[in-house]
Amino acid sequence: MFEVTCKECGKKYQSEKNRDGYCEVCRSRRIAETKHKYYETRKAKRDEIRKKVDRCENCGKKFKPKKSDQKLCEECQYLKESNYRMTASNQYRKDHTDVIQFKVPKGMRADLKKYAADHGMNMTALIMNSIELFQKFLALPDDQRDQVNELINKKDDKK
């Protein structure tokens, strides 16, 4: 243990470290003052920002910044973020998906979309499910495949 003198009040006290400069009372007061100064500084900066009017770097319109480093008005910031999200999404699609396009007779596109929506799917899911079913159909033995074809033809004849 070391006997140390407080730099602020001059009171002598015992400490485990010889580098302590302030007694517990003075130390807690200094910490409170530091926190208060920090709060006041931040409050002054917030008030200064609220009074400040800047020009948008993109469109030149005047706006009140909400942060000290804000450079764009809200509309331009939204467009910038939207453009970033769109670019990122497009890049992901480009890297992780393939595109297949095919033509259908006029008016059938809407019918296919409606059919898919009625069954809780989008067009991609509808096509993928159709391919999967067709593969299962082809895997059937010939006699079962003939029975399925007969059932389909009976339904088509009724229409």
Image (cartoon, rainbow, N blue to C red):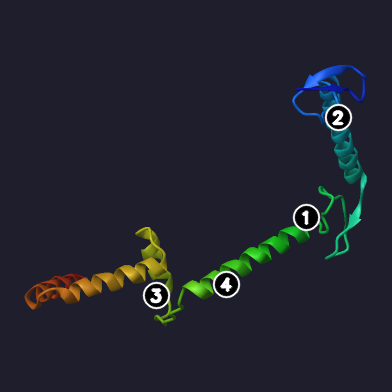
> Is residue 39 visible in the rendered structure shown here?
yes
> Is residue 153 visible in the rendered structure shown here?
no
Dot 1: what SS? Answer: helix
Q: In which quarter of the image is residue 124?
A: bottom left
Q: Earlier in the sequence, mark 3 or mark 4?
A: 4
Identify the disc placed on residue 93.
Answer: none
Identify the disc placed on residue 91.
Answer: 4
What percent of the width, then of the height, locates residue 96? 48, 72
Q: Which of marks 4 and 2 is nearer the N terminus?
A: 2
Q: Quickly name the residue at label 1.
A: 74
Q: Earlier in the sequence, mark 3 or mark 1?
A: 1
Q: Which residue is drawn at 85% across and 64% down?
A: 57
Q: Residue at x 89, y 38 (%)?
A: 41
Question: Could you tell me the amino acid type at mark 1?
Answer: Glu
* Left or right position of 16 against 89: right
Q: Quickly name the residue at label 3.
A: 108
Q: Nearer the viewer, residue 97 or 123?
A: 97
Question: Could you tell me the amino acid type at mark 3?
Answer: Met
Question: Could you tell me the amino acid type at mark 4?
Answer: Gln
Dot 2: what SS? Answer: helix
Q: Quickly name the residue at label 2.
A: 36
Disc 1 + disc 4, Cβ < 8 Å: no
